[in-house]
Image: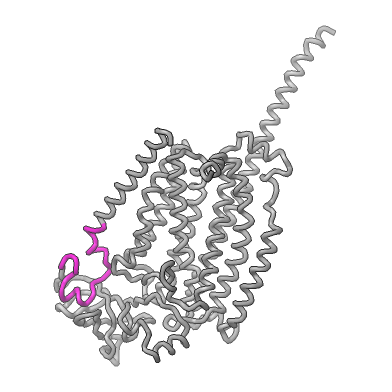
Amino acid sequence: MLIQWLNEFAKPDRTYILCNQLLPWFIGAAVVALPLGMLWGLAFAPTDYQQFDVYRIIYIHVPTATLSLTTYVAMAVAGFVALVWQWRTALTAMIAIAPVGAVITLISLITGAVWGKPTWGTYWIWDARLTTQLILLFLYIGVFALYLSFEDKLQGGKAAAILAIVGVINVPIIKYSVEWWNTLHQTATISKLDKPSMPPEMYIPLLLCMLGVAAFIGTCVLLRLRSELVKRDAHRPWVSDFMKDTNSPLRVIPMIKLTLTLSAVAVALVLHSMLSQGFKFDDFTAFLHMGGRGTFVWLSFGIGLGLMLLLLSHSILMNRFVKLAVEKQQARAERILTARKKRKRQVQELPNESKA
Amino acid sequence: MNPRRKKRLIAVTSVVVLFAAATTVMLFSLSGSIDVFYTPTEIHEGKESTGQIPTVGQRIRIGGLVVPGSVVRDGSSLSVRFDLMDTGPKVTVEFNGILPDLFREGQGIVATGVLQTPTLVVAQEVLAKHDEEYMPPELAEQLKDMGHLKNEKGAY
């Protein structure tokens, strides 16, 4: 049953429709969780007893760092399916994930460096955790570059899939590096088995940020996957069918009525518990100042959110460009077809004229 | 599962397994050098796994807790001298420079420098290590009163 249901998604049009169905949920979750979680973390969560306000970088550093690993595993699984079952949709998904993962990893590295300067005293140290995370970034870039460097995209995809699968070994090494070796980086605050080493007032906004970043990653991946599917299949009938039909999933903006209602409820709930904690700063200037560490906090959030915005706009623009390219191509095909018909008619009419 | 698919599955899985094995072997043989620092005990007694003791004149990193009451600051310069320990013997560190925010007695730090005598490190860089505990100051205050603060028991 499950296998049969999964097999459906080897077809690009089914995968495309799935993307469209999932997108509103991811967009909704990202729009609710990301701004609220970060606002909560920055302004309403209590300060830390040792690091004071600079610890607030955790609300962008930890979600991106953790999810960069999850995203990598997802990419490797897609690569595995693509190699063994030879699904082109899985290959496309892998290629859609790679750049998103690279940007998320880059954010985790930059925010970590900006956090390291005031707390540790250095931006960078070649300890096991930081080095392996840097390798993760190179793996993401490598997978994408390997795919791009092949003229034959199917071959390139296969080569990239092998790299993605082999690179998965790095994931447990990153995760356990802080336990296996002496590192400057501390061990995990959140783990699934133990109680978090954080009180709930700090923990809940962190979870919210995690959810937001996860939904953001999902949104970007789905947007890119849609574009890649159409780009690759531009000449296939399902694409032209979707383009011609005005009610088709290619045209219709994802229905977001339901998600909007649900989001409103979620926003109300979150706002209630956030506001009940109270604003943690005396005034707005104190908020910007962050106890003297404003530069570091705002720098990491600025760079992080800026990179996320760039990624999102690229994913959206890519969608648009691909659609334009497909429309152009189909218009050309149509023009050629009509021109051919016209010539045929002329050829047929010419002998008649001469007779007359 | 059809035979071709099975073949591919076996091929891909064996590549991953071989690679994992190779990486594990590599990491095991490198385990001593991947550690970012020696602990004070390791400077005295050698690394647990290899028994390797750093020699005088060697550039090393040392990580440990600042022994409370051992910090001696020079009045006229940035020079500072303090002891580090983990569970066993102490190692003295001399440093001339700006200490990170989190430097305080009982704090875990990592210092990079040259081993002058078997128990003295002249550091060029001092980094603070912090733990994974985050809590509001009020809560930390309460825990301190109850004597429950993990940091004081030697986690670093």
Residue, x 28% and y 51% (percent of image)?
B21
- Which portion, as a residue range, is magenta? B27-51
Residue at the far top in the pictured view: A355
Q: In this view, does A317 lie above or below B6?
A: below
**Quadrant in the picture for residue B10:** top left
Residue B22 position within the rendered picture, expressed as x and y whole percent measured from the top left: 27, 50
Residue, x 46% and y 39% (percent of image)?
A85
**Quarter placement of the N terminus of chain A:** top right
Q: In this view, does A66 lie above or below A156?
A: below
State left or right for residue B120 relative to residue A28: left
Residue A229 position within the rendered picture, expressed as x and y whole percent measured from the top left: 57, 42
| Nearer the observer, A269 or A255 | A269
Residue A329 position within the rendered picture, expressed as x and y whole percent measured from the top left: 64, 36
Residue A355 position within the rendered picture, expressed as x and y whole percent measured from the top left: 82, 7
Q: What's the coloring here?
A: one colour
The answer to whether residue B117 is magenta is: no
Residue, x 56% and y 84% (percent of image)?
A281
**Quadrant in the picture for residue A266:** bottom right
